[in-house]
Amino acid sequence: MCVDKIDKNSLAGKAGAKMSMKLKVCPESGFLRVDAVGEFSIAEAERTFLEMLEAVARHKVRKVLFDGRGLAGEPETMERFLYGEFVAPAFAEVRRSRDAVPLNAIRICS
Protein backbone atom coordinates (compact mmCIF):
# COMPACT_ATOMS: atom_id res chain seq x y z
CA MET A 1 0.00 0.00 0.00
CA CYS A 2 1.46 3.33 -1.07
CA VAL A 3 1.14 6.43 1.07
CA ASP A 4 1.07 9.90 -0.42
CA LYS A 5 -0.20 11.94 2.50
CA ILE A 6 1.78 13.46 5.35
CA ASP A 7 0.93 12.73 8.96
CA LYS A 8 0.39 16.15 10.58
CA ASN A 9 2.15 14.88 13.73
CA SER A 10 5.28 13.81 11.88
CA LEU A 11 8.44 15.93 11.75
CA ALA A 12 7.77 16.66 8.12
CA GLY A 13 4.13 17.57 8.76
CA LYS A 14 5.08 19.98 11.55
CA ALA A 15 7.13 22.06 9.12
CA GLY A 16 3.83 23.69 8.19
CA ALA A 17 5.07 25.32 4.99
CA LYS A 18 3.23 25.28 1.68
CA MET A 19 3.99 21.95 0.08
CA SER A 20 5.14 22.12 -3.52
CA MET A 21 6.87 18.73 -3.44
CA LYS A 22 5.02 15.55 -2.60
CA LEU A 23 6.23 12.02 -2.01
CA LYS A 24 4.49 8.77 -2.76
CA VAL A 25 6.01 6.12 -0.50
CA CYS A 26 5.50 2.48 -1.48
CA PRO A 27 6.90 -0.30 0.71
CA GLU A 28 8.22 -3.11 -1.47
CA SER A 29 9.92 -6.36 -0.52
CA GLY A 30 13.05 -5.19 1.32
CA PHE A 31 13.00 -1.55 0.21
CA LEU A 32 10.93 1.60 -0.14
CA ARG A 33 10.04 3.04 -3.51
CA VAL A 34 9.71 6.82 -3.19
CA ASP A 35 8.34 8.87 -6.08
CA ALA A 36 8.69 12.65 -5.80
CA VAL A 37 6.58 15.12 -7.80
CA GLY A 38 6.18 18.88 -7.81
CA GLU A 39 8.39 21.96 -7.93
CA PHE A 40 11.88 21.68 -6.39
CA SER A 41 12.86 24.03 -3.60
CA ILE A 42 15.52 23.58 -0.94
CA ALA A 43 12.99 23.90 1.92
CA GLU A 44 10.73 21.30 0.32
CA ALA A 45 13.65 18.96 -0.36
CA GLU A 46 14.61 19.14 3.32
CA ARG A 47 11.02 18.53 4.45
CA THR A 48 10.55 15.56 2.14
CA PHE A 49 13.91 14.07 3.16
CA LEU A 50 12.68 14.02 6.78
CA GLU A 51 9.45 12.44 5.60
CA MET A 52 11.42 9.77 3.76
CA LEU A 53 13.59 9.03 6.81
CA GLU A 54 10.45 8.61 8.92
CA ALA A 55 9.10 6.12 6.37
CA VAL A 56 12.39 4.19 6.41
CA ALA A 57 12.20 3.85 10.21
CA ARG A 58 8.48 3.03 10.18
CA HIS A 59 8.86 0.27 7.59
CA LYS A 60 12.21 -0.95 8.96
CA VAL A 61 13.92 -1.07 5.58
CA ARG A 62 17.54 -0.47 4.66
CA LYS A 63 17.16 0.47 1.00
CA VAL A 64 15.38 3.32 -0.77
CA LEU A 65 14.74 3.69 -4.48
CA PHE A 66 14.09 7.42 -4.99
CA ASP A 67 12.59 8.59 -8.28
CA GLY A 68 12.84 12.35 -8.73
CA ARG A 69 11.89 12.42 -12.41
CA GLY A 70 8.56 14.03 -11.49
CA LEU A 71 10.28 17.08 -10.03
CA ALA A 72 10.47 20.34 -11.94
CA GLY A 73 13.31 22.81 -11.51
CA GLU A 74 17.08 22.62 -11.41
CA PRO A 75 18.88 23.15 -8.09
CA GLU A 76 21.75 25.63 -8.22
CA THR A 77 25.21 24.58 -7.04
CA MET A 78 24.76 26.35 -3.70
CA GLU A 79 21.36 24.69 -3.17
CA ARG A 80 22.97 21.30 -3.74
CA PHE A 81 25.61 22.14 -1.13
CA LEU A 82 23.03 23.38 1.39
CA TYR A 83 20.92 20.27 0.86
CA GLY A 84 23.94 18.05 1.53
CA GLU A 85 24.73 20.10 4.62
CA PHE A 86 21.18 19.42 5.86
CA VAL A 87 21.03 15.74 4.89
CA ALA A 88 24.30 14.63 6.50
CA PRO A 89 23.42 15.51 10.13
CA ALA A 90 19.76 14.45 9.69
CA PHE A 91 20.90 11.05 8.44
CA ALA A 92 23.49 10.78 11.23
CA GLU A 93 20.82 11.57 13.84
CA VAL A 94 18.63 8.74 12.57
CA ARG A 95 21.58 6.36 12.68
CA ARG A 96 22.24 7.33 16.30
CA SER A 97 18.63 6.80 17.31
CA ARG A 98 18.20 3.67 19.38
CA ASP A 99 14.88 2.92 17.69
CA ALA A 100 16.17 3.26 14.15
CA VAL A 101 16.96 0.48 11.77
CA PRO A 102 20.68 0.28 10.90
CA LEU A 103 20.86 2.46 7.83
CA ASN A 104 24.44 1.96 6.72
CA ALA A 105 23.27 0.18 3.56
CA ILE A 106 20.78 2.79 2.34
CA ARG A 107 21.40 4.03 -1.18
CA ILE A 108 19.35 6.89 -2.58
CA CYS A 109 19.27 6.92 -6.37
CA SER A 110 17.73 9.63 -8.50
Image: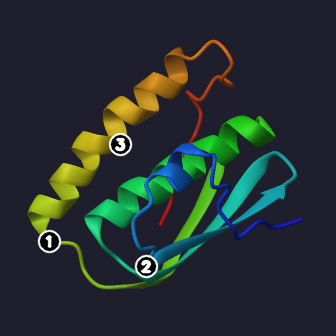
| CA distance for labels 3 and 2 | 19 Å
**CA gap, disc 1 and disc 2:** 18 Å
Q: Residues within 10 Å of mark 2 (few under 14, many from 20)?
A: some
Residue 94, numbered circle = none
Q: In the displayed structure, does residue 47 sit left or right of residue 98?
A: left
Please state which of the two labelled residues, at mark 1 or mark 2, is closer to the viewer: 2
Point out which mark residue 20 bears.
Answer: 2
Q: In the displayed structure, would residue 99 be above or below residue 91?
A: above
Task: Work out whether mark 1 precedes mark 2 in sequence or the reverse, and give the earlier one.
Answer: 2
Relative to 100, is 107 on the left or the right?
Answer: left
Which quadrant would residue 36 be assigned to in this image?
A: bottom right
Which amino acid type is marked by label 1?
A: Glu
Q: Residues within 10 Å of mark 3 (few under 14, many from 20)?
A: some
Q: Nearer the viewer, mark 3 or mark 2?
A: 2
Q: Quadrant of residue 66?
A: bottom right
Report the disc number at residue 87: 3
Q: Give me the residue at 35% from left, 42% from top.
A: 87
Picture disc at residue 76:
1
**Residue at left 58%, top 39%?**
106
Which percent across, then down, holds residue 33? 70, 62
